[in-house]
Amino acid sequence: MAYDYHGATFENHSFTGHHAPLYVSDVDTPDYVGFNVNHSINTWLRLGASPDKLVLGMGSYGRGFLLDFADQNGLYAPSHAAIPAGPYTREAGNWGYNEICEKMTAEPGQWTTVIDPSYQAPYSFKGLEWIGYDSIESITTKAAYARDLGLAGGMVWSVETDDFHGNCGQGAFPLINAIARTIRN
């Protein structure tokens, strides 16, 4: 389970944070340098876990926040609440990838997407809404990371939050298919 490093509904913080960064970033404060996939996996390996017994868990959803100020919209930006619930997950602070891609498809040009070079995963914002998540590209990078380390494979939490209907023009189950394709190759 290499996700849920940050989330508005379960942390007592007043700032944004990506829930599934691949590596530590120079924006991370000392308290959060271990909140990333690479640190978690390498901790297991350093403690003696066999790579072929580890399956990398990846999220097919995002964690979102409401910003305090629209012009302060990066990582660790001031935040006061969870993003409102999406139509399918119906849980504040949590949007499935299907909800994220449908919203951005329905609101073209309104969302700004940033890919942090260390996290290697996107976050997007519009007005006061902010969401960190995995895209096809970032989940492919994570699957390649698992493959290259010789891990047993990859899994997602959870299957129903991928774009299973293919409503966003990327085919059905784009995240799960990206993982499978990458690990098989």
Image (tube, helix red, strand yellow):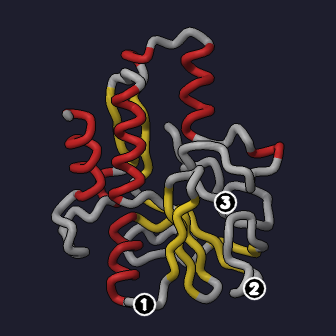
Q: Quadrant of residue 109?
A: bottom left
Q: Which residue is mark 2?
A: 69
Sequence-first disc among 3 and 2: 3
* Residue type beneath disc 1: Gly
Residue 72 in picture, x, y percent from top left: 74, 80
1 or 2: tag closer to the N-terminus: 2
- Discs 1, 3 touching: Cβ within 8 Å: no
Residue type, label 2: Phe
Residue 142 x, y percent position in the rendering: 42, 42
Residue 3's tag is none
Residue 24 lies, with reference to residue 87, above or below; the image says above
Which circle, 1 or 2, is nearer the viewer? 1
Q: Is residue 41 above or below residue 82?
A: above
According to the image, label 3 marks what residue?
17
Q: Which residue is mark 1?
A: 109
* Res 146 quadrant in image: top left
Q: Label 3 is placed on what type of residue?
A: Gly
Answer with mark 1 or mark 3, whichever residue precedes in sequence. Answer: 3
Look at the picture and state if 12 lies above or below 143: below
User: Nearer the viewer's eye, disc 1 or disc 3?
Assistant: 1
Report how far apart the C-alphas of labels 1 and 3 lie in the structure. Answer: 23 Å
Look at the numbered disc 3 and give the secondary structure of its residue.
loop
